[in-house]
Image: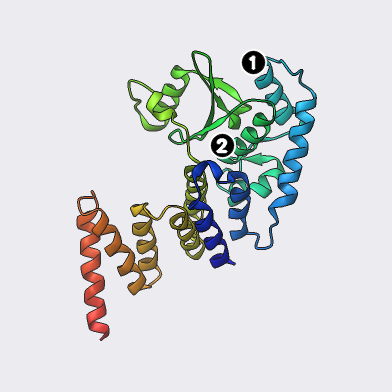
Amino acid sequence: MHEALRQILQAEAKRPDEEIDVLRMALLVARHAHAELDPDPYIDRLARWADDLAKTLPEKADVPTRIARLNHFMFEELGFSAAQEDYYSSQNSCLNEVLDRRRGIPITLALIYMALGRRIGLELEGVSFPGHFLVKLTVMGGQVVLDPYNKGVSLDEDDLRLRLISQYGKAPATIQPLLYRASHREILVRMLRNLKGIYQMQGEIQRALEIIDLIIAINPHLDEEYRDRGLLFYEVGYSFAALRDLRHYLAAQPNAEDAAEIRDLIISLQQQGMHLH
C-alpha cells in the first residue's frame, strides 16, 4: 500500500499546481494509516455541507457577511473545533478523522474551511505562516487573514507579529512576505511534515521513513528530507541506505550549516562498510 500511495502522490505532483486536487490528495495521504480509505464519501459529505451553507446566504451577500456565516456554520452548526488536548495525535493530520471527529489542527481545519468558503464565493487561499497554518482572502485594497484553528478569527499585522514574538522571540519589520499563497504541493508537504514530526516524537521510525518517502515523491528537491531520512536509516542500522541519502544531501548542500557533521558521519559509515568487507 505504501508504494501504491507513493506512486499516486508522485504522479499527481507532476501536474500543474492548479490542477492538483489538494482535498482528494490530503485524504489519500491518510491511507498511510487507513489502507482502505475511499476519499469519495468524505468529498461528497463536504459537498453536501457546502451546498447547505450556500442555501443560507443571499446571492449578493457582502464579504463580511459571507465570512461570518461560514464561521458560524463550520464552528457552531457543524461543531468543528481546535484539537488542543491531543494536538500531537496523528489523527489530527488525517483529514478523514478530522471530518469524522470534527476536531483538527490548523492545516486540516483550514482545508475544510477553504472548501466550504469557496462554495459561497470566498476565494480563500492557504498561508504557510511560521508555526501556524492560516487562510487569506484578497479583497479590494488588501487582504483578510483568518485563523480556522481559532474559529475563523480575523488577524491584523499586529496580531501576527505578536504571534511570532511569542513563539520565536522576534518578528520581522514587515509581515507581508510571510503571507504568500501556499501552493497545493506546499500544503501537502506541510501536512506530511507534521506527520513526520509526530511519528519521530513517538519513536515510530518506520512510519516516519514512509512519510519522508511521500514528501520526496511530491517534491524530490527538498534536500533536507534526504538528510532526515538518512539519519533515520542510520538510527535503525540501515547503513547503505543512510549513506545513499546523506551523500545526496551533502552533494546538494555542500555549504549547509551541518555539512561538517554529515561529512563526518558519511566517513564513519564508509569505514564501517570497509570493515564489513
Q: Which mark is residue 215?
A: none
Q: Judge whether residue 100 can be spotted in this image.
A: no
Left/right placement of residue 191 relative to residue 72 reads left
Residue 65: x percent and y percent?
Answer: 68, 16
- Compare residues 197 and 62 and report the one nearer the observer: 62
- Compare residues 32 and 220 and report the one nearer the observer: 220
As drawn, 117 above or below 198: above
Give the quadrant of residue 106.
top right
Classed neighbour count for the residue bearing mark 1: other residues with Cα under 10 Å, few (<14), some (14–19), many (≥20): few
User: Which image quadrant: the C terminus?
Assistant: bottom left
Left/right placement of residue 193 relative to residue 124 reads left
Residue in view at x 46 percent, y 58 percent: 217
- Compare residues 7 and 210 and report the one nearer the observer: 7
Residue type at tag 1: Pro
Residue in view at x 69 percent, y 35 percent: 80
The mark closer to the camera, 2 or 1, is: 1
Residue in view at x 69 percent, y 31 percent: 119
Q: Which residue is mark 2?
A: 106
Left/right placement of residue 61 relative to residue 152 reads right
Residue 137: x percent and y percent?
Answer: 55, 24
Q: Which residue is mark 1?
A: 64
Residue 203: x percent and y percent?
Answer: 48, 60
